[in-house]
Every structure is written in structure tokens, then in C-alpha cells.
Amino acid sequence: MSKSTLTERGQISVPASLRKAMKLRSGQSFKWVRISDREFRVVVEAGQPPGPLSVLGYARKRRPAPRRTAAWMRELRAGEKNP
């Protein structure tokens, strides 16, 4: 069983072993459900909207592989020879 301590600011950290096992990320939301006077259930909320950084790399996945500089230069030079 893992253990956490409540800080003066009301914060609780989730142990690393649980974060890794549940694949939790920074910024995820949790819902606290009171079970009894001394017991709570913590539920990870699904459907977290993607943040602005989620678009990074999107174009790279959709376009063809980048061409090397040498390939561009061959194409350009071939056009110069045939006016």
C-alpha cells in the first residue's frame, strides 16, 4: 500500500508507482467521492481535452518523408539545364 501526506496548502502527491501503473499525466483531473467519515474514492476523470502542445508533430505525421538537400539541389539543377 502506498502512502501520501497532506501539505499545508491541501495538496496530496500521487506515489510514482501509482502514476506509472495508471499512466497519469500532469494536469489530469480527479473526482473525490466520499464513502464514509474516513474513506474516499478517487476517480480519474476521462475525456481530458488535449492541450495546445498536442498539435506538435501533427504535420510531420501527415506529410511524406522530408527530402534531403541533395535531392532538392539535383531537381533544381536539372531544371537549369533544360530551359
Image (spheres, rainbow, N blue to C red):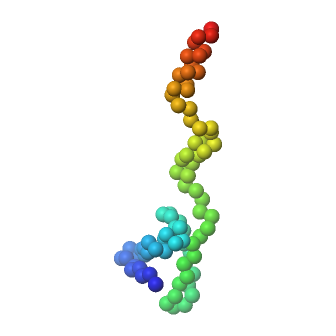
Q: Position of residue 34 (x, y in %)?
A: 56, 84
Q: Position of residue 38 (x, y in %)?
A: 49, 90
> What quarter of the picture does the C terminus occupy?
top right
Q: Is residue 11 left or right of residue 36?
A: left
Question: Residue, x 55% and y 46% (percent of image)?
Answer: 57
Res. 25 visible in picture: yes
Q: Determine the image quadrant of residue 2.
A: bottom left
Q: Position of residue 81 (x, y in %)?
A: 59, 11
Res. 14 visible in picture: no
Most distant residue in the bottom direction: 37
Q: Position of residue 42 (x, y in %)?
A: 54, 78
Total labels drawn: 0
Q: Nearer the viewer, residue 8 or 42?
A: 42
Question: Residue, x 53% and y 67% (percent of image)?
Answer: 23
Q: Nearer the viewer, residue 40 or 25?
A: 25
Question: Residue, x 58% and y 42% (percent of image)?
Answer: 60
